[in-house]
Image (cartoon, rainbow, N blue to C red):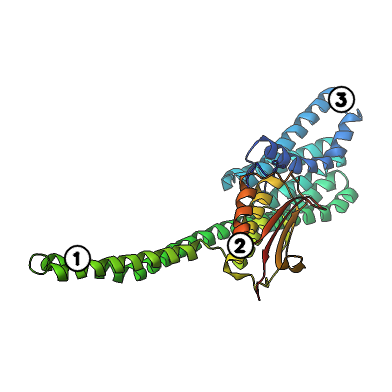
Amino acid sequence: MTTEDRPRGPEHPTGLGQPPRNRRELLRKLVWVGVWLVFMSSPVHDLAAGHHTPSGTAAGWLGLAVFAGVYLLLVFRNMGQPMRRPLVAGLIVVLCLLAVALCLTFGAAWLGLFCYVSVACGAALPLRAAYWAVPATGVVMMLVGLATDVAQARNLVLVVVLIGFAMTGVVQLIRTTVELREARATVAHLAANEERLRLARDLHDLLGHSLSLITLKSELAGRMLPGHPDKAAQQVADIEQVSRQALVDVREAVTGYRRPRLSAELAGAQVALTAAGVSAELPAEPDLAGAGEDGEAALAWALREAVTNVVRHSGARRCVVQLLHRQTLDGPMLELSVEDDGSGGSGAPGNGLTGLTERLEKAGGMLEAGRGRRGFRLVARVPLTP
């Protein structure tokens, strides 16, 4: 199915552990990280209340802006493109010193800045270092609280420690997601290499004997040609017969390679939809009794094209794949339906739909595509034989 079949839907959000690929994704990630700046409302309210001199207020705004900039650099930039560890450690020290200086200068209302120091430690430091840095941040805040407001520092210390350790969990989730993505790519690469090796082995088994026999008979015919042309002609006839049989064997092998299996396509669809962030519901063990090889191949092609369209163009969040046996006026049918909650489409017969229709018609089936209850729905049917 191509972009002619359905309009392009909204892009999927950037996945965990992936750097932004365009300005929209950059803005989305910046908003996700920056939304936590709402906890700076207490320092902002303190500055806006006018309790400080004009020069002190200006210095406070400047200090708060520098603090927020260092925090965003640590948390946002380091997630997309990790910085060197000495630089990360230096920026965290700067962030902590800023928090201490601002709290001692402007009072207990600024103790909440240590929450951001703890988050930066959990997000940017290695896991082992973060396990020490997060509690240390709580200790520093308590020491600062002795000079400002012990009660408020005591109320915040649990939040500071918990939010830092929670951030280490988020970082581990991101790292695991990246590793899984890389593992999937490696598995796909290994599977492709294994398929190439299998193809090479099969071609060697199919053609090795035939080509050796053709070479042998060609040499024999060449030696017989001057003195025994009738025997040479027999050898040439044998060569023709062997070459024709080799051609038949190769065609059968290629046809087998090109015929997809529905079970393999279902497994591939699960991986593709999950990787694209689409919630997938697929049958675990498809019942293909009576479908035949041609019918199964046609349904497998339909599933591949439909899932490709869902991943690339629909903007869907949920996709349901069903495989049902139905009794129709034309006889028993095996029905494959793929329905998503994406942007939908007109179902106009573009190149993708036309190609699927032709494949299904060759197998005696039919194709329906258009709006469903949730979004776009594609239904492919092939006849069942006893």
Q: Where is mark 3, residue-wise?
A: 53
Q: Where is mark 1, residue-wise?
A: 218
Image quadrant holding the C terminus, namely: bottom right
Q: Is residue 13 visible?
A: no
Q: Where is mark 2, residue-wise?
A: 363
Packing grade of label 2 (10 A; few <14, some 14-19, many >=20) is many
Instruction: Give 276 or 382, whichever is nearer the viewer.
Output: 382
- Residue at coordinates 58% horizontally, 48% vertically from top-left? 85
Amino acid, disc 2:
Ala
Amino acid, disc 1:
Ser
Residue 75 rendering spot, x and y as whole percentages: 69, 44
Instruction: Give 195 or 212, whichever is nearer the viewer.
Output: 212
Q: Is residue 221 visible?
A: yes
Is label 1 in a helix, a strand or a loop?
helix
| Up-down relation of residue 348 to residue 228 (above or below) | above
- Residue at coordinates 13% horizontally, 67% vertically from top-left? 229
Is label 3 in a helix, a strand or a loop?
loop
